[in-house]
Image (tube, grey):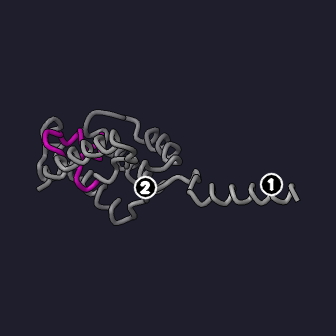
Amino acid sequence: MRLTVSLALALLLATVVGALGCGTEPVGVESCRTIEEKRCELAPTCGTSPDVAACKRFYRDQCLHGLAVEADPGKPAVDKCTAALDAAATCAKRDPGAPCASVGAAPGATSCDAILKPELLTECAWLVPVVPVTGAAGAAGAAGAASTAGSAGAGGS
């Protein structure tokens, strides 16, 4: 009897832990690869990463960890992000150190900043990791993050 109760409790605990989503499945591996491959191709525009093939090999493996987001944004969002990166590269070819308002980058960000940190682009803003809010200190941090994200979004208007 005692063994049966212990076994039942163990099974219940395993079921609860499994239901809480404690899995280790990466999110958005292919989305990550698509964006990173585009960045590798465009980085030479800004004078960085001259070995495009090595860059792509590196990120092919790095992206096995997935994106630091709650859910894969899907192909349409990834396509918009890579198109924004292409637009940033077009501006960077004219002047790598100048901002390019037409690509929707955060205020003060240059085209090369956007290629190196695509989350600065309005179309790629979903790349900013979601930080869980816990307690009053977490809420204050989230409010600060929301304020920053709002500023970045305003730059594209």
- Which of the numbered marks, if any, corresponds to residue 92? none
Which quarter of the figure has residue 40? Answer: top left
Mark 1 surroundings: few (<14), some (14-19) or many (≥20) residues within 10 A: few
Mark 1 highlights which residue?
Answer: 6
Label 2 crowd (10 A; few <14 / some 14-19 / many >=20)? few
Query: Of 97 and 71, which appears nearest the observer?
Result: 71
Q: Is residue 95 above or below residue 126?
A: above
Q: Which residue is mark 2?
A: 70
Farthest residue in the bottom direction?
A: 76
**First in residue order: circle 2 vs circle 1:** 1
The question of residue 152 being in magenta is answered with: no
Q: Nearer the viewer, residue 17 or 30?
A: 17
Find the magenta span and give its range: 106-124
Secondary structure at badge 1 equals helix
Residue 67 appears left or right of 124: right
Question: In the rendered view, does 55 fall on the left or right side of 64?
Answer: left
**Residue 9: % across, % down:** 74, 57
Label 2, secondary structure: give it.
loop
Residue at 43 percent across and 48 percent down: it is 68
x then y, percent, for residue 122? 22, 53
Inspect the image, locate mark 2, and give the three-letter code of the amino acid beneath it: Glu
Asked whether, in this view, residue 54 is left or right of residue 112, the answer is right
The amino acid on which the numbered mark 1 sits, given as a three-letter code, is: Ser
* Quadrant of the drawing holding the C terminus: bottom left
Camera-side residue: 75 or 88?
Answer: 75
